[in-house]
Amino acid sequence: MSERLVGAKRAMSRAEADRIVERLAEHLDKAYGISDVELLLVDYRLAALLPLDGDREPLTRPGHPAWRCFDHQAEVVTDGVVYLPVTMRGDRLGVLRLAPLPEDERRAELAEIATYLAHEVMAVRGSTDRYLVAARARRLTLAAEMQWELLPGRSRYRSSFALAGQLEPAYSVRGDSFDWADDDHRLWVAAVNGSGEGVAAAALTSLATYALRNARRAGLALADQAALADQAVYARYRGREHLAALLLELDLRTGVVTAVDAGSPRLLLLRGSEVADVELEKQLPLGMFDGTLYRPQTFELAVGDRLFVVSDGVYEATDRSGARYGDAALTRFVRRNRHLSTLAAVRALLGELRAHVTADLDDDAVVVCLDWTGPKGA
C-alpha cells in the first residue's frame, strides 16, 4: 500500500466527524494534485445526487456521468473529471467527484479511497447530522424520520446474494418498512405492510421490527420470531392495531427459503423470463389476536432467481382517474427489467409508480428485491 493511500485513510480516520471530506480534499491536493473534490449523496427518494456543501445544483438527469457511476457502480471519466462510487458492502451512499485527473499510477488508488470514504461516513452518521441532512431534497416528516432510522440500509451485496429495498413516499412514509440481516450462512428479510397514520403507524412498525430483531438475535426459529412479535404488538394494542408482515430466511448454502406469511405483502418469483406469485399459507397479521401460533413453509430458489416483495401500496396505487397500477403491470415490470441490478430495479419500479399516479403515492409502498446468485463459496 502506497504512502499516498495510507495518508488518505489516515486523514479520514483522524478527521472530525463532520469534516471528513474536507480533510480528504486537503490530502488529495497535496498527494495527488487533485484540487476539486466533491461528495454527491443520493437522496432519500433515489432521484437526486445532492452536493454535500449544497452550493451546486442537485443532479437529477439519468444520463449524467455521476448517475452512470452510481447506477453501474464503476468509475466514469469525462472531460478531465473522474466519478467514483461511494459504497460500503453494497450500500450506495453516492458518488465522489474528483478533478483534475491524476497520473494513471495514482488514479488506480482512488477507487479504494472512495470505498474507504463510504466506511468513514457510515461510521460517523450516528454522531453528526451533516451527511443525513445533506442527503435530503426536502424535510422529512417525523414519521418518516422514525422509519428511515429503523432501516438496515438500502442495498446489500454478498457473494451469494444481492439485495435492495426502498420506501415510498420517501419523505413522508408512515407504516411500511423492511429489515434484513445476514451471517455466515443465513439471510433474514422482513417486509412490513403497516397500518395507521403518521407517528402512530411508525411507532407500531418500530415495535414489531424491534420485537422481530430481538427474537432473531436470541436465536429463535422463524415461526417463533413471528410469535414473539405478535405477542409484543398484542400486549401493547390488545388487538386494536395490527400489521401484516412477510418473514423470510434464506439458507446461503442451499438456496432453501423458510417463510412465514403473516397477512403479508406479495412475493413474486422471477425465474428466467417467467414471473409467478409464490403461494404461501396466509396466516394472521401480527398483533391481531393473543397467542397466535405461526407455521413456517419452505421453497427452494434456483441460481439466478429473483424475488420481489411488494406491499399493497404498489399494485393498488391509483392515478387521478382511479385506475390501478395493477397486477399485470407489476408482472410486466418484473419481467421486462430482469437485467437491472436489484437497487436499479427497485428504483425503476417506484419511478414507474410515481409516473402512474403523477404525484407522491397516497399509500405507503415498500419494495424489496433479492437476487440469489448461488451457494456460499460457489
Image: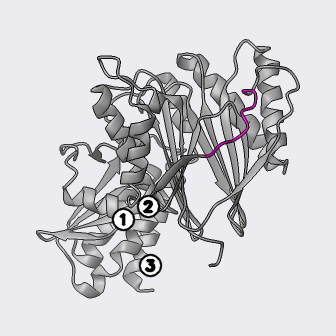
- In the image, what residue type sits under mark 1? Gln
Q: Which percent across, then down, holds residue 52?
A: 31, 48
**Does 160 lie within the magenta span?**
no
Residue in the foreground of this view, choosing between 129 and 147 = 147
Residue 10 appears at what percent x and percent y? 46, 71
Earlier residue among tags 3 and 2: 3
User: Residue visible at 45% across and 55% down?
Assistant: 342
Q: Residues within 10 Å of mark 2 (few under 14, many from 20)?
A: many
Mark 1, residue position: 73
Q: Position of residue 60 (x, y in %)?
A: 22, 45
Stretch in magenta? 278-285
Q: Nearer the viewer, residue 198 or 38?
A: 198
Quadrant that contains the C terminus: bottom right
Above or below, 281 against 324 in this view is below
Neighbourhood count class around disc 3 (C-alpha, 10 Å): few under 14, some 14–19, many 20 upward: few
Is residue 285 found left or right of 29 in the rendered image? right
Q: Residue at x 25, y 42 (%)?
A: 54
Residue at point 78% right, 41% down?
214
Element under label 1?
loop
Above/below status of 133 relative to 34: above
Secondary structure under tag 2 reads: strand
Residue with the most extreme top position: 240
Dot 1 surroundings within 10 Å: few (below 14), some, or many (20 or more)?
A: some
Residue that badge 3 annotates:
6
**Residue 284 counted in the magenta span:** yes
State yes or no: discs 1 and 2 in contact (Cβ < 8 Å): yes
Residue type of the residue flagged with mark 2: Thr
Q: Which residue is mark 2?
A: 87
Viewer-side label of 1, 3: 1
Disc 3 or disc 2, which is closer to the eye?
2
Disc 3 residue type? Val
Could you give the CA–CA distance between mark 1 and mark 3, rounded to whole angstroms? Answer: 24 Å
